[in-house]
Amino acid sequence: MPEEQAFSVLVKIMFDYGLRELFKQNFEDLHCKFYQLERLMQEYIPDLYNHFLDISLEAHMYASQWFLTLFTAKFPLYMVFHIIDLLLCEGISVIFNVALGLLKTSKDDLLLTDFEGALKFFRVQLPKRYRSEENAKRLMELACNTKISQKKLKKFEKEYHTMREQQAQQEDPIERFERENRRLQEANMRLEQENDDLAHELVTSKIALRKDLDNAEEKADALNKELLMTKQKLIDAEDEKRRLEEESAQLKEMCRRELDKAESEIKKNSSIIGDYKQICSQLSERLEKQQTANKVEIEKIRQKVDDCDRCRDFFNKEGRVKGASSVKGVSDEDTDEEKEALKNQLRELELELAQTKLQLVEAECKIQDLEHHLGLALSEVQAAKKTWFNRTLSSIKTATGVQGKETC
């Protein structure tokens, strides 16, 4: 149960159930309860009542804790819980039922004791007996079956007050007034002490409240400063967010432009590479055709040389000029004109062969040049790709690095 509810239950029991009256006016109401208990014993347990009179055992000697603590001082809690439940249902008269039940169940043992033994029995043996739940259950059944009318309790209460009034009338007025005066003086001293304690507590409370107020004001100032700093940080964060969004938009636009530019360069380089490939293929076809034509022309010349009876003796099968010593059957009667004609014809053939070789070399040079240009174009494409990728990556790293530093 929470503390607030427990305190509310205590207040309810003290005021609404009359338990507070037992502690007021020098326990006057408590002594009235003792008188009622003794009268009930006289009616329900007369032999035990007479035994207590013989050994001079009065009710306040053993029953005070029953009324003041509701049996919680000595008895086990499960038994006390039942008693409190009955108290909340029936009222404070339940204490008489439980007290009579205890005395009835212990009558045989109490009749055998003297004054000291009875006090020891109430202090030690009686609580031990009800550590067993069965004994506690039988006790609660006996208490519930015991019927005590409120009229009878009111009657005993009136008898007690009448007896007290008679005792007061028989008492010497001076002694009564002196006792009343002492009681009032004690009450006055007690009230003055309570007043001093309350004044001290009030001053202490004011000082504590002032300190708490100062601490609260300091905390409020600190929280206001922190709130202002937080608002400023929020504004800075929003500005930083807008700036980063703008930079992100710029970066996206730059990346888009670079990507478009790279795509256009790739398309351009691809078209150039296609043109270079087409040119190379055309040159290769022309070179092959030229080589084929040269071979055909050389074969025709060789065939003409082989068909000529005069030239056959001057050229070997590889088309080279034979030496003078290797020429056999050549007539010494050939004229200088024929030799000169053959020499001219040979020079023309050699010149034509040299031109063909020169064209072949030029074609090979062009092919190498085109291959070189193709390699340069490919390297430019790769460089363009790397340059665009590196610039994009470096810009992203730069933006990320700047954002990380500013965030730190």
Image: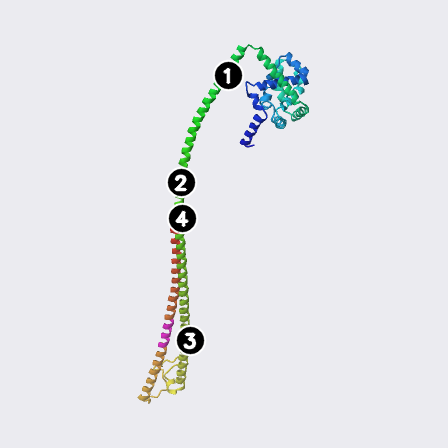
Please identify the quarter of the rendering in which residue 173 is found: top right
Q: Nearer the viewer, residue 294 or 208?
A: 208
Q: Earlier in the sequence, mark 2 or mark 1?
A: 1
Q: Which residue is mark 3?
A: 285
Q: CA distance from mark 3 to mark 1?
A: 141 Å
Q: CA distance from mark 4 to mark 1?
A: 75 Å
Q: Earlier in the sequence, mark 4 or mark 1?
A: 1
Marks 3, 4: nearer the viewer = 4
Residue 398 vs 25, above or below: the answer is below
Q: Judge the density around disc 4: few (<14), some (14-19), many (≥20) Cα neighbours within 10 Å.
A: few
Please identify the quarter of the rendering in which residue 361 is found: bottom left
Q: Which residue is mark 4?
A: 237
Q: What residue type is disc 3 on?
A: Glu
> Is there CB contact under 8 Å for labels 3 and 1?
no
Q: Which residues are magenta?
A: 358-367
> Is there CB contact under 8 Å for labels 3 and 4?
no
Quadrant in which the N terminus is drawn: top right
Residue 170 placement, left or right of 403: right
